[in-house]
Amino acid sequence: MKKIILAVGALLTMAFTCFAATPEKYFKYDILEPQWVQAAQMPAGDYVKIIELKESELIKDGIKTVEIPAEIEGFKVLAATITWIKENEFEKLVIPENVVFLCLANGGEKGFKEIVYEGTKDLYFVDVSSSSFTSAVFI
């Protein structure tokens, strides 16, 4: 009976791990500037931007699918920047619906075999060389 309970517990843990967003400890993040919030036509408030993916920690922990979290510390993630990743290092990048701005630069886009956007809203690619909204284009 004890073995059955342990086996069921292990299966539940695997199920939640497979379908949960990648924990926030694997991302470096900051508060998003108000002009980006306004450009996204979101209500005023604090939102988060991911500014770095901690690639070496993900690799060390055996994580192959990176799912950007919808929220970090209770704030919605509205933007993400992913750069300098070794080609095909990860299986998949999953982008949740509330992410509006995405910057994949300097090889960031090559680090994933598959990129999936779960949203129905417009997703804008942002040029890393410019911090102005005018550099964002629909993809």
Image: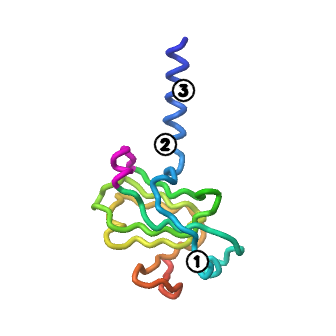
Sequence-first tag of 1 and 3: 3
Q: Is residue 131 above or below residue 18?
A: below
Three-letter residue code for mark 3? Gly
Three-letter residue code for mark 2? Cys
Distance from label 2 to label 1 (Cα)? 32 Å
Observer-side mark, 2 or 1, equals: 1
Q: Nearer the viewer, residue 20 or 120?
A: 20
Secondary structure beneath disc 1?
loop
Q: Classify residue 39 by image quadrant.
A: bottom right
The residue shown at (50%, 30%) is 11
The residue shown at (58%, 58%) is 72
Report whether 127 appears left or right of 21.
Answer: left
Secondary structure beneath disc 3?
helix
Report whether 24 appears left or right of 47.
Answer: left
Q: Which residue is mark 2?
A: 18
Q: Which residue is mark 1?
A: 33
Residue 9 tag number: 3
The residue shown at (34%, 58%) is 113
What is the magenta range?
Answer: 56-64
Q: Residue 93: x and y, percent? A: 43, 58
Three-letter residue code for mark 1? Glu
Q: Which quadrant, please, contains the N terminus?
A: top right
Q: Residues within 10 Å of mark 3 (few under 14, many from 20)?
A: few
Distance from label 3 to label 2 (Cα)? 14 Å
Q: Residue 110: x and y, percent? A: 32, 65
Contact (Cβ within 8 Å) of mark 1 with mark 3:
no
Residue, far left = 87
Observer-side mark, 1 or 3, equals: 1
Q: Is residue 77 magenta?
A: no
